[in-house]
Amino acid sequence: MSNFIVFGLPRSRTYWASYFLSYDRVVPHCKLITFPSAEEIIDYFQDPNACVSDEVGVGIWHQFIPFLPHTKVAIIERPVEEVIAAQIKSGVPDVPQTRFVTEYLDYKMKELKRCYSDIQVFDFHTLSEEKESARLFEYCLDIPFDRTWWTPLVSRNLQNHYSPPAQELLKWADYPVMSTLIEVARSCPNIS
């Protein structure tokens, strides 16, 4: 077994990937937001079974990825405009901060890709195809693709509909992932 991280923007199948890759262990979704420090993220990945499918942790990748040389990283790409439209459709407020934070996370994923040539990139639109799903499965899990596992999951539209109240998000405001996103949102131009 090897540990891995799957990064993607919101509404880019990261929640689906957490189910799909929970074949021989549980793959948490958006766990990185819950760590009070980058050091705790690094400690978490010392366990060879540690893994996560995450949307916002990529915002601080530079604080932990360099210290995880044996952790595989996969990126699910989806165009920013599609992501923003899907977020708004799911109830995320159509405000400048939504666009600004989404563009920031996209920038951080592209930055991560430029820095590490061994990262595997997957396209949101082809991830529902057997060949691309098999590639993600085999890359992350180091075992042969199991079509019988994939078949009932491929057509499921799994989405995290959990929208925590602002006060719950604020309890993580001092944690590195959230504090970074809060600063990004605050620096958004043209906000009154």
Image (spheres, grey):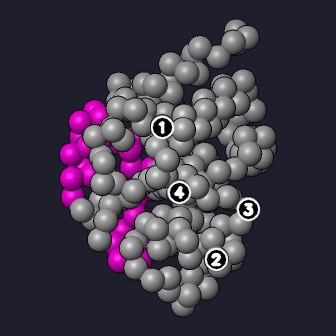
Residue 21 among magenta residues: yes
Measured Cα–Cα span from mark 3 to mark 2? 12 Å
| Other-residue count near label 1 (Cα within 10 Å), few / some / many at <14 / 14–19 / ≥20 | few
Number of numbered discs on residues: 4
* Residue 173 % position (x, y): 40, 26
Instruction: Give the number of the disc on residue 125.
Output: 3
Q: Secondary structure at mark 2?
A: helix
Viewer-nearest residue: 167 or 89: 89
Measured Cα–Cα span from mark 3 to mark 1? 24 Å
Residue with the mark numbered 4? 120
The residue at 69%/50% (across/down) is 78
| Other-residue count near label 4 (Cα within 10 Å), few / some / many at <14 / 14–19 / ≥20 | some
Q: Secondary structure at mark 3?
A: loop
**What residue range appears in magenta?**
20-47
Where 13 sits versus 26, above or below?
A: above
Instruction: Give the number of the disc on residue 97.
Output: none
Q: Earlier in the sequence, mark 3 or mark 1?
A: 1
Question: Looking at numbered disc 3 in the image, what kind of residue is underneath it?
Answer: His
Question: Looking at numbered disc 2 in the image, what kind of residue is underneath it?
Answer: Lys
Left or right relative to 185: residue 48: left
Quadrant of the image for the N terminus? bottom left
Residue with the mark numbered 2? 131
Q: Earlier in the sequence, mark 2 or mark 1?
A: 1
The residue at 34%/54% (across/down) is 71
Measured Cα–Cα span from mark 2 to mark 1? 26 Å
Residue with the mark numbered 1? 115
